Amino acid sequence: MSDKRKTKVYAFGFDGTLTRRDPLIAFIRFSRGSITLAYGVALLWPMLLLAWLRLYDRGKCRERLFHFFFHDMSTDYFDDLCDHFARSRCRIIRAKGMERIGQAVREGCQVAVVCSCPESLARPFFEQAGLTTTGHSPQVRIVGTRTELRGCWLTGRFASPYCYGREKVSRLREVYPYRRDCRIVAFGSGRADREMMEFADDGYVEPFK
């Protein structure tokens, strides 16, 4: 199939590509306070250090961090915090990246935002920009780490593998199973997006800084 007949897909990394800093850490500071964040980091410091040295699984580290701050929180309260975070911390988003997403939507292209952080944390930034992220044909598909629920409560665990590295490619394959029918253009930064960039037909590193 010629490139002109293929579905054009724009895949954007979120953490560090569309955002200016780590969104999960910024969200913990926003929702739990700097003192509580510092306390949690102090308790989990050995694990965090090992993960930074790549001697401990990054996904397990992030899951334990998430569990420490959010286990047994109601989903309604968590979602409200995510909405409030997106409204009050909108400057965390790189304006040029959001403009590029808007351009891709106007061109009628498929758009996926592939994030390591929980999907529910990323989604409000795009909904508040007037972009649909749910339904049969969303303008922007949020593809990220899913949180495990027990009824209407967060367990603090992840319901899917941590969306980082190779997992980003696996999740894109789920959303776009007919790879040969797509032309994928990826925007990423750092180690988290390396495999996604290699998977794409065209890749741009740190394009919005």
Image (cartoon, rainbow, N blue to C red):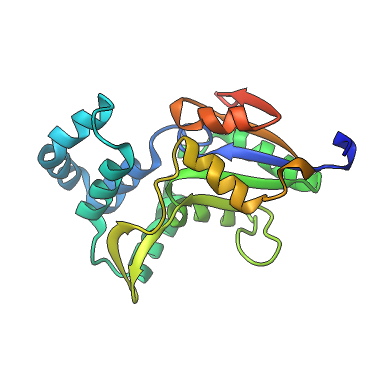
* Residue 37 on image: x %, y %: 20, 44
Residue shown at the point (54%, 50%) measured from the top left: 143
Left or right of 83 on screen, residue 29: left
* Residue 108 on image: x %, y %: 80, 48
Can residue 203 be seen at all in this image of the molecule?
yes
Residue shown at the point (38%, 36%) measured from the top left: 22
Q: Residue furthest bottom?
A: 151
Quadrant of the image containing the C terminus: top right
Q: Quadrant of residue 155?
A: bottom left
* Residue 59 on image: x %, y %: 33, 42
Which of the pair 6/190 is nearer the observer? 6
Quadrant of the image containing the N terminus: top right
Which of the pair 99/147 is nearer the observer? 147
Residue shown at the point (15%, 44%) measured from the top left: 40
* Residue 172 on image: x %, y %: 59, 46
How many labels sit on residues? 0
Instruction: Work out whether 85 lies above or below 164.
Output: below
Q: Quadrant of residue 107?
A: top right
Left or right of 182 on screen, residue 193: left
Q: Quadrant of residue 197?
A: top right
Can residue 90 be seen at all in this image of the molecule?
no
Instruction: Work out whether 116 lies above or below 31.
Output: above
